[in-house]
Image (cartoon, rainbow, N blue to C red):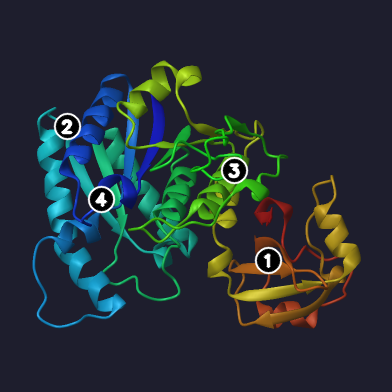
């Protein structure tokens, strides 16, 4: 049976100390991905490294601001990066295809399904999708936090069996990784709080830190996908995770055995695309957070903010302005406003299209 795995390779794995691309490490990753392909895995590679690749290509005569650097070096580097991957995988007679995407490209259900269809036909034809954010145009508040967030969305969208996040540490530690007394936490279950252990230290060359990785890992695991955080600099780490998982240092976020529907997976990652806010009373908030699966009824709504249409994504907040859920509205904002407090009508957000935070 073919298994589907999404592998995210971080900037700190692919970047040398001088800030330039580590081609030797890229080659090692390609060798391991080729091994996975030979052992009946479908692989989607979410790869950082465009900025590092471009940084070594030219010297700039004037000082650039952060946005200009990001645009210039990623434009130069992405071409070099995909060509390097092309050459490395060609040694194994494997085909690769480049997918550059943006956060906005996941904002509607249609765009989301279009990207899913593109990657599906690539996998069906044996092509390895190599995914990265299009840094040349993603320079607004709608950027991904980093490629950890992108990889989580891709794993969810493509119904992956496993998401592997390769970083420059062995996993989640129960203290500072630099502390010799700290140990890697081998397994994290959905009801375990590990926030006290996580240091918000961002990588030298990337945008994200361990808090981002853990938040994404927990969300994806809750959707029924196994998530592994491991050290991409460890020799043959991907092969060892398959062949000798118990002896290989890593942290596994254990997947929820129940999982969720494909629509709910999209909604779960759509909070930042919300077109409106639904404010609800305490009774409604308690009902949503209870053990029983319920829809959001208009009788529990106290206010509606924003201008949205039926089918748009909305955030649901409690009386303390805490976002407790995200969902797909069954009404336009104009129609919903007229029906606030009404009984015995269709839900504002049906349970099938509602995800708790």
In this rendering, which labeled residue sits more in front, label 2 or label 1? 2
Residue occupied by mark 1 = 330
Cα–Cα span, label 4 and label 2: 24 Å
Cα–Cα span, label 4 and label 1: 47 Å
Q: Which mark is residue 15?
A: 4
Specify which label sits upstream in the sequence, 2 or 1: 2
Specify which label sits upstream in the sequence, 1 or 3: 3
The kind of secondary structure element at disc 2 is loop
Specify which label sits upstream in the sequence, 4 or 3: 4
Residue 334 location, quadrant: bottom right
The kind of secondary structure element at disc 4 is loop
Left or right side of 4 for 216: right
Cα–Cα span, label 4 and label 3: 25 Å
In this rendering, which labeled residue sits more in front, label 3 or label 2? 3
Q: Are marks 4 and 3 in contact (CB under 8 Å)?
A: no
Who's the residue at 34% across and 41% down the image? 120
Q: Are marks 4 and 2 in contact (CB under 8 Å)?
A: no
The kind of secondary structure element at disc 3 is loop
The picture places residue 217, in percent across and down from the top left corner, at 54, 44
In the image, residue 182 above or below residue 345: above
Cα–Cα span, label 2 and label 1: 45 Å
The C terminus is located in which quarter? Answer: bottom right
Residue occupied by mark 3 = 175
The kind of secondary structure element at disc 1 is loop
Q: Nearer the viewer, residue 68 or 90?
A: 68
In the image, residue 310 above or below residue 10: below
Quick one: label 1, few (<14), some, or many (20+) residues within 10 Å?
A: some
């Amino acid at each position: 049976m073919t298994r589907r795995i999404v592998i995210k390779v971080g900037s700190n794995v692919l970047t040398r100390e001088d800030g330039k691309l580590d081609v030797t490490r890229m080659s090692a990753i390609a060798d391991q991905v080729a091994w996975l392909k030979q052992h009946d895995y479908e692989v989607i590679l979410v790869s950082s490294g465009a900025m590092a690749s471009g940084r070594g290509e030219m010297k700039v005569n004037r000082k650039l601001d952060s946005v200009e650097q990001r645009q210039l070096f990623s434009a130069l580097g992405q071409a070099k990066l995909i060509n390097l991957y092309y050459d490395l995988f060609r040694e194994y007679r494997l085909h690769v295809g480049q997918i550059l995407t943006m956060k906005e490209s996941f904002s509607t259900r249609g765009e989301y399904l279009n990207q899913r269809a593109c990657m599906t036909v690539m996998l069906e034809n044996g092509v390895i999708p190599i995914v990265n954010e299009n840094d040349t145009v993603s320079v607004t508040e709608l950027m991904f936090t980093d490629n950890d967030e992108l990889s989580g969305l891709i794993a969810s969208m493509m119904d992956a069996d496993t998401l592997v996040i390769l970083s420059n540490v062995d996993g989640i530690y129960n203290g500072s990784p630099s502390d010799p007394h700290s140990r890697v936490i081998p397994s994290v279950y959905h009801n375990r709080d590990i926030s006290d252990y996580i240091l918000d230290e961002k990588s030298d060359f990337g945008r994200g830190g361990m808090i981002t990785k853990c938040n994404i890992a927990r969300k994806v695991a809750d959707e029924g996908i196994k998530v592994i955080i491991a050290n991409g600099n460890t020799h043959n780490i991907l092969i060892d995770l398959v062949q000798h998982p118990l002896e290989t240092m890593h942290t596994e976020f254990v997947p929820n055995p129940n999982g969720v529907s494909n629509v709910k997976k999209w909604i779960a990652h759509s909070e930042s695309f919300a077109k409106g806010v639904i404010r609800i009373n305490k009774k409604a908030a308690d009902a949503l957070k209870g053990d029983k699966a319920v829809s959001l009824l208009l009788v529990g709504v106290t206010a509606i903010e924003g201008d949205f249409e039926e089918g748009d994504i909305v955030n649901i907040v409690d009386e303390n302005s805490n976002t407790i859920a995200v969902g797909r509205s069954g009404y336009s904002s104009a129609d919903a406003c007229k029906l606030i407090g009404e009984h015995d009508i269709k839900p504002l957000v049906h349970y099938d299209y509602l995800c708790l935070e």
